[in-house]
Amino acid sequence: MPYEYTLAALTITSNRTLASLAPLFMGVITHPRDHKETFMTFEYAKIKPVKLRDVEKDERWLQGKIADDPSILGLGDLVVLQREKIQSSGGRIDFLMYEPEEQTRYEIEVMLGTLDESHIIRTIEYWDIERRRYPNFEHRAVIVAEDITNRFFNIISILNRSVPIIALQLNAFVLENKLVLNFVKILDLAQEEDPSEEASEQTDRKYWENRANKQSLNVMDLIIAEMSQAGNKVRQTYNKSHIAFGTIGRNFAWFHPRKGARLHVHLLIGPDNRETIVTELQEIGIESSVRGKKSISLVLTEDEFLQHKDKIVSVFRVGEESTKR
């Protein structure tokens, strides 16, 4: 039996329960005699859960509906950049979508039936290819499947700690001759951790002198020396996992000295102009990338700092200012 696809069904967002299907049911409006309030009551209607293949709909049909209205995924106001984009690995990513306001790209794989290992691997592989190709954007891996078993849910939950992966389960229903689609977000992004709140045992300078390369620590010392020249009191907190740094406000930089000569830095600068700052740093040869929603990361050597001191210090000043907001 052919079923008519209804656009109204596509407005159902991912975190709503089946109660949100009520607006699709036949309703009557009752006007009380005083006309002070208007109530809408709904007639009960039984819906039938189905698998898309059982109602003669294939993956291409589903992709078409998503392409026509990406908002049905419940991920925001996304724009389709490309469909079935060919990857350097030889595969094709079902969708590459973009959220302009957050400057975020979504690598999306869609499948009918039960999620399997190959789709998990492909989704992460495509996400990794795209993030390396376009490092100035945030990237999200998205898996869409009709059934996600406990086994694979546990696997992608573990992966979610290091890969920003979202899992959507597609539920399809028949209501009379209407085919209803509902995408449920069963796994969201792991909460971004603020390094300032990271539980870590405090220690002292000697701990890091024994653990890290002297040149890596020197880069940190040079940065702190420059930041103190404005007359502000600087504050360092030595922890076993990082060295926190702040001046007039809360901490805004977290140093991670290494056994090599380079220093890794997590710098909180706020959501504005992050991509521009990262691009400018990359153009002068400084390894940098956006991180989370308000931060960037830098990797510096002593020579790089001395060569580009003014620019690097100016970026740290942006971080310092962000603590005043």
Image: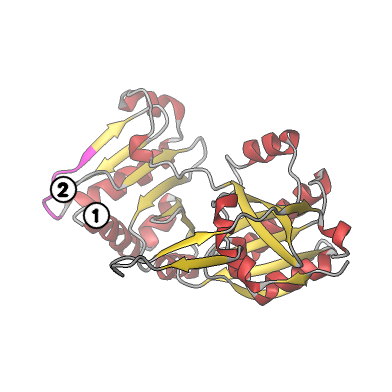
Q: Nearer the viewer, residue 298 or 19?
A: 19
**Which residue has dot 1 on it?**
320
| Mark 1 vs mark 2, CA separation in Å | 8 Å
Secondary structure under badge 1? helix
Q: On the image, which quarter does residue 187 sit in?
A: top right
| Badge 1: residue crowd in 10 Å (few <14, some 14–19, many ≥20) | many
Picture residue at 39% right of the left edge, 62% below the top: 307
Q: Which residues are magenta?
A: 230-235
**Which residue has dot 2 on it?**
248
Mark 1 and mark 2 lie on one chain; the one further toward the N terminus is: 2
Quadrant, the N terminus: bottom right
Left or right, 270 with respect to 67, comes to: left
Image location (x, y in percent) of residue 231: 11, 51
Amino acid beneath label 2: Ile
Picture residue at 66% right of the left edge, 61% below the top: 107
Image location (x, y in percent) of residue 131: 62, 60
Left or right, 48 with respect to 266, comes to: right
Image location (x, y in percent) of residue 227: 22, 52
| Badge 2: residue crowd in 10 Å (few <14, some 14–19, many ≥20) | few
Picture residue at 63% right of the left edge, 36% below the top: 158
Q: Nearer the viewer, residue 66 or 173?
A: 173
Q: Nearer the viewer, residue 119 or 239?
A: 119
Secondary structure under badge 2? loop
Quadrant, the C terminus: bottom left
